[in-house]
Image (spheres, coloured by chain):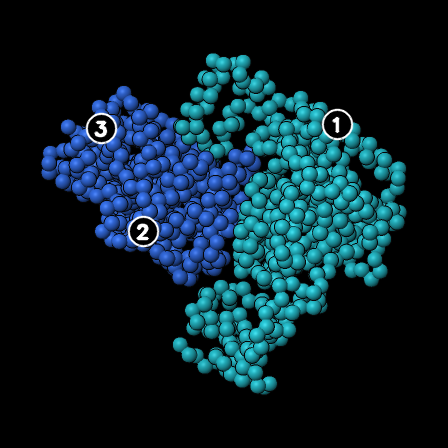
Chain colours: A blue, B cyan
Amino acid sequence: MSAILQGAGAATALSPFNSIDSNKLVAPSRSSLSVRSKRYIVAGSDSKSFGSSLIVRRSEPLIPNAVAAKADTAASSTSSKPGHELLLFEALQEGLEEEMDRDPHVCVMGEDVGHYGGSYKVTKGLADKFGDLRVLDTPICENAFTGMGIGAAMTGLRPVIEGMNMGFLLLAFNQISNNCGMLHYTSGGQFTIPVVIRGPGGVGRQLGAEHSQRLESYFQSIPGIQMVACSTPYNAKGLMKAAIRSENPVILFEHVLLYNLKETIPDEEYICNLEEAEMVRPGEHITILTYSRMRYHVMQAAKTLVNKGYDPEVIDIRSLKPFDLYTIGNSVKKTHRVLIVEECMRTGGIGASLTAAINENFHDFLDAPVMCLSSQDVPTPYAGTLEEWTVVQPAQIVTAVEQLCQ
Amino acid sequence: MALHLRSSSSLKSTFLNILSLRQNLGFGSRSHVTRHIRQNLPHDPPLRGSQNPIRGFCNTMAEQETLSSFGQHEDASNHQVMDFPGGKVAFTPEIRFISESDKQRVPCYRVLDDNGQLITNSQFVQVSEEVAVKIYSDMVTLQIMDNIFYEAQRQGRLSFYATAIGEEAINIASAAALTPQDVIFPQYREPGVLLWRGFTLQEFANQCFGNKSDYGKGRQMPVHYGSNKLNYFTVSATIATQLPNAVGAAYSLKMDRKDACAVTYFGDGGTSEGDFHAALNFAAVMEAPVLFICRNNGWAISTPTSDQFRSDGVVVKGRAYGIRSIRVDGNDALAMYSAVHTAREMAIREQRPILIEALTYRVGHHSTSDDSTRYRSADEIEWWNKARNPLSRFRTWIESNGWWSDEAESDLRSRIKKEMLEVLRVAEKTEKPNLKNMFSDVYDVPPSNLREQELLVRQTINSHPQDYPSDVPL
């Protein structure tokens, strides 16, 4: 059911998003402009053959709207193939490996990504397969290896820069903001910086304040970069591949606690749209916008809400910069109530920006003020019980929905 | 874990021993070392035999060619040594600190003396008449270009400018020693490298005026040049951020096995930035073919080098990172040329970084926003400009070879001056880039929010045209 809705949404819209989408999807080979037709648009949860296979497998029929195997899961397999089950970090690795196979310019750099396989095993096995130069272990200096990645990107490589923890990328802020975001612009378009900067962030299990940061708040203002957050193995692989193929610098936010999520994903190649939000559960009464780990808290709350007779529409925004105001807008126009559930701090987080964007654009459609549930403006405590309460819990979400729907 | 290793004097087993050791001790990855085995052991003896207290206190790898068993043992001279990652370390019962500095400073390589005469027994790379004349002409061109742009700023025709006066030899001679495939990551005082590669005076002026012919589409301030076809990366104003970028580019060249290196320039002030240290360290570990050229010109705006660092300049820092380094007289074009030429070959052939410290002086102000007489004496500036002028020294040398004359000089100067004035006139008159360039190239395709914002700006301009500059086309 979710797949059909999503498919219908994409098919009717010849909005600007679609033209951007196509461009992103065919970034490496700009010659295949036929892709601009909407047939090729990857609609969120639908799976499809794509990428370089576009040219090779032209004789195969393309499936624009795959029917979901299960109605309540976001990821779906096509009815033609069984798919394979894996964990989220394996999905990331699979996406990365496929892209490295496809394009010899893709390389990985970061701390312990090589023979150690990465702190969260996302790069496991890649050094053995592709060699030490393509999967590069770097000394500890985030600013330096991010800078290195940018320099390498300007000379034609497509680096995937891993921050062992997103929080460490604060050290790389100078390079990300001043060089990564700006150089395409200030060079007059002469130099592109197709890097992917990725890493785990968010509140984990007692990792301490420094290792529990939400960097999306700080990066969201930087002009020139795109930000996406993955939440399921399906979109993790899809977003990883799309990010690597994008000509823009993309920051891919993963979450420490989601790496072991299991899901069945399609066998055939697919990518996810970088600027698109994902419809997790369509509904009528209220729009709940969320991303990354909070999606699961929201879905848990949704079960309770359904029992209580509510029908929430849950959207995983996925694209943190720019927001998919098309999907979000359609939802707001339908339900007239918005609840944002995020892990960022109250001040200056993604929720704050999203609240502003919704108020500005869809004010007339709101029956109630936009409500935003976020973490408090405190450094994450180490104590387990306190840490749990800095993060939005399903019970709070239920209460908030009840409040909004009065 | 204890693996008994047979002692052997062959280099190959030496390396295998290092690998096993490193594997056992959990240090590093073995295949990283195996793939990058070089013929030389990590610590080569220094190129110059200067008094080096460090060598006196511990045995370096260069002197110990064999690794025997793991752990302590007693060698023939009855001194205990320990195997440790990186090589054997001898023990000493004396409590001795390595001195913070040598008694003598690292000597500076030069080929032409203060009067432009070739020093006897000097080693240098020979230059042909054609190359020498081009080096000199480009130095003159750079000097005149700088002077005229500076004056233009003073007259209000340009908004900003930063000169490279006094550093012409570093700019041009280093560029001459490179090939067009070498990728350049400049700071902002190296327009001479672009000039050498063929950037025209008109192109310089276009960038300074930010007109529609500027390759940067008018987005940056003057002197922030960039040209992808000349392999000169757009100047980013932030200090030393280009150093890790250069290492990344070198890494890319290394992966593609190109016969080229990355070259990056920075000043004495830039060596204080964290990026400098990290980049040098990375380059050494990655064995990346990159030249780090430091223009030690004595001043970082108003900060003299004595307030910037307490080491013997920048050249000694190379050793800390395991990088071969050299100190050169930056105002001696021939020495600069030879040093960069040799360094480039080493970098590419041996796949290693090289650090070059070029001693020079910033004759001009930091930029047009600075008045350096407020923090330094006019005499000092004058002395360097006259007694140590890079142009006059090189001119003496090419004239002594019969390759130049007073006539050629005055011809060149009047031609360049005329060209510069024309170039200024044309650049000033040329239209500015269209407003849409404010929003393009932020991403590859403008997203909806930027398109919206552009519309808003245009609407505002429509309703208040008198507040909008008349020379920016809509």
SS under mark 1: helix
* Amino acid tagged 3: Arg
Q: Which residue is disc 3 drawn over? A: A337
Q: Which residue is disc 1 drawn over? A: B421
Q: From this viewpoint, is residue B242 visible?
A: no
SS under mark 2: helix
Q: Are marks 3 and 1 on the same chain?
A: no
Residue A368: percent from the left, percent from the top? 22, 26
Residue at image location 70% in from the left, 61% down from the top: B106
Q: Identify the subunit bearing mark 3.
A: A
Q: Identify the subunit bearing mark 2.
A: A
**Are dots 3 and 1 in contact, CB under 8 Å?**
no
* Amino acid tagged 1: Leu
Q: Which residue is disc 2 drawn over? A: A256
- Neighbours of disc 1 within 10 Å: few (<14), some (14-19), many (20+): some
**CA distance for labels 3 and 1:** 65 Å
